[in-house]
Image (cartoon, rainbow, N blue to C red):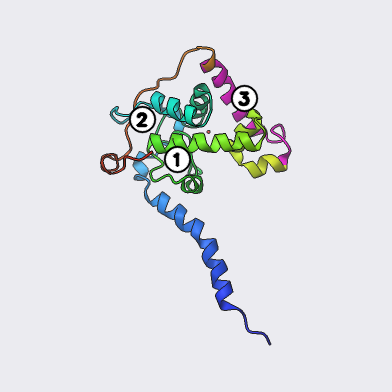
Amino acid sequence: MQLPDWNARWSRIARALVPLAVAAIVIAAMPPASRLAVDPAMKDYSRHPASVPIASLIATYADQYALDPALLQAIIKVESNFNSDAVSSKGAIGLMQLMPLTAAAFHVLDPFDPNDNIRAGAALLRGLLDRFGGDLSLALAAYHVGEARVRQAVGVPALPATQIYVDRVLGHYERFRSGGRQPALRSVVRSRSARAMAHQSPVTD
């Protein structure tokens, strides 16, 4: 009888546990439950004192990733309603509602930090646009529900809830781009003052 290869088995187990460990670290950094905004549409901006202008961050990362600033505004409007403390019932975090594994993949140290959050969200959207040949509807659908599900569904119409999401983002995008009423792009600070001192680096209406 051939003996099992324990080294190979433990190596596979270790590789499987690494993403879970990263997610656990990110989740551990979340604030207490009393501060979580399970319904991100309840506020137009963070309740914390002003210090970092969201509009400036949007402009910076829109330029860096060749995106229309109005598009990033529209996504943030639908995802979190400009609440940097927003946490969804599925665990998505911050202005652009990054999932913990996504945040880790884009080297986000603090997903509640608007700078890190918008940088990672813009980078993710740029990659999706490139992989879907510039098709904005498909890229937005993939941002909402994941690239694999969009490819399996062969388009957005097969995903009704995602179609609603895409329509909402596109509606806000057209309004912001055409000079309609802009959202309250008030400044926000990070969730914890200690982080604001220690961390200076930048990376669902």
User: How far apart, in angstroms, are the residues tagged by discs 2 and 1?
Assistant: 13 Å
Amino acid at circle 1: Ile
Residue contact between numbered discs 2 and 1, judged by CB atoms under 8 Å: no
Q: Horizontal and vertical percent for residue 182?
A: 45, 16
User: How far apart, in angstroms, are the residues tagged by discs 2 and 3?
Assistant: 25 Å
In this view of the protein, can residue 85 be seen by the observer?
A: no
Q: Is residue 50 above or below residue 159?
A: above
Q: Which residue is mark 3?
A: 167
Label 1 SS? loop
- Residue at 41% x, 41% y: name it: 111
- Residue at 36% x, 23% y: name it: 186
Label 3 SS? helix
Q: Which residue is mark 1?
A: 93
| Quadrant (top left/top right/bottom left/bottom right) for the N terminus | bottom right
Amino acid at circle 3: Asp
Whether residue 107 appears in magenta in the rendering, the answer is no
What's the magenta region?
A: 153-176
